[in-house]
């Protein structure tokens, strides 16, 4: 994925067209601007992540198991296609540099966080979290957990360390990192 490899500014329509096997003029038939194309890639990448995480938690019972399943699914997505992760990791920087992207990406991101909101809501409903839980704070924590894993994967490039971090996160969510007292 050219945007993941080069970023928004350095990626050209010619490069994208060449990879897609079309002319650069044909891109404009589908996308009126590079910004629209970038936003479409963002929406597709978010959809891939949402689908993977949703499928991972579908059969899970309990909040800890859902978090562990999301961590494992997120890690597997990176191993299957690092370009999705690499693209998403750089979104914040691209949005800061390009205001024409920022507002639309924020709206798309809010739609994506519904999955995390559902996980937290279910945890409160199921009694895994107290009813007084600040749900938004827990949603933010889950986002930080998953996006931090993505950033780590993007920066480290060592599959052994990446798998180790995912395993440690899973142990943390299950309480296995804390000795019994």
Image: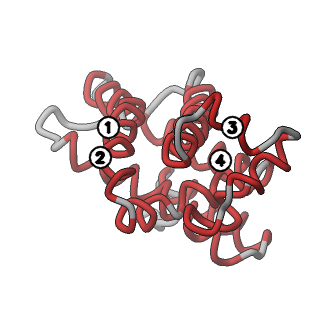
Q: Nearer the viewer, mark 2 or mark 1?
A: 2
| N-terminal label among 4 and 1 | 4
As measured in the structure, the alpha-carbon distance from the residue carrying label 3 to the one carrying label 2 is 23 Å
Q: Position of residue 109 (x, y in %)?
A: 38, 41
| N-terminal label among 3 and 1 | 3
Q: Residue at x 38, y 61 (%)?
A: 98
Quick one: 18 or 138, which is closer to the camera? 18
Residue labelled with disc 3: 27
| N-terminal label among 4 and 3 | 3
Q: Quadrant of residue 40?
A: top right
Q: Residue at x 68, y 78 (%)?
A: 156
Mark seen at residue 131: none
Q: Is residue 46 left or right of residue 161?
A: left
Q: Position of residue 86 (x, y in %)?
A: 64, 61
| N-terminal label among 4 and 2 | 4
Residue labelled with disc 2: 103
Farthest residue toward the front?
A: 25
| N-terminal label among 3 and 2 | 3
As measured in the structure, the alpha-carbon distance from the residue carrying label 4 to the one carrying label 2 is 30 Å
Q: Nearer the viewer, mark 3 or mark 1?
A: 3
């Amino acid at each position: 994925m050219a945007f993941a490899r080069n970023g928004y500014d350095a990626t050209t329509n010619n490069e994208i067209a060449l990879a897609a096997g079309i002319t650069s003029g044909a891109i404009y038939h589908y996308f009126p601007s590079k910004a629209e194309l970038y936003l479409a890639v963002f929406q597709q990448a978010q959809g891939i992540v949402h689908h993977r995480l949703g499928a991972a938690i579908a059969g899970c019972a309990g909040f800890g198991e859902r978090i562990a399943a999301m961590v494992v699914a997120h890690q597997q997505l990176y191993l299957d296609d690092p370009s999705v992760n690499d693209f998403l990791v750089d979104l914040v920087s691209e949005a800061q540099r390009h205001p024409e992207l920022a507002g639309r990406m924020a709206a798309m991101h809010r739609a994506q966080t519904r999955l995390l909101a559902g996980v937290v809501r279910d945890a409160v409903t199921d009694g895994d979290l107290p009813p007084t839980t600040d749900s938004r704070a827990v949603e933010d924590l889950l986002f930080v957990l998953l996006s931090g894993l993505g950033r780590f994967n993007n920066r480290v490039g060592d599959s052994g360390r990446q798998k180790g971090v995912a395993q440690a996160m899973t142990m943390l969510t299950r309480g296995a990192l804390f000795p019994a007292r």
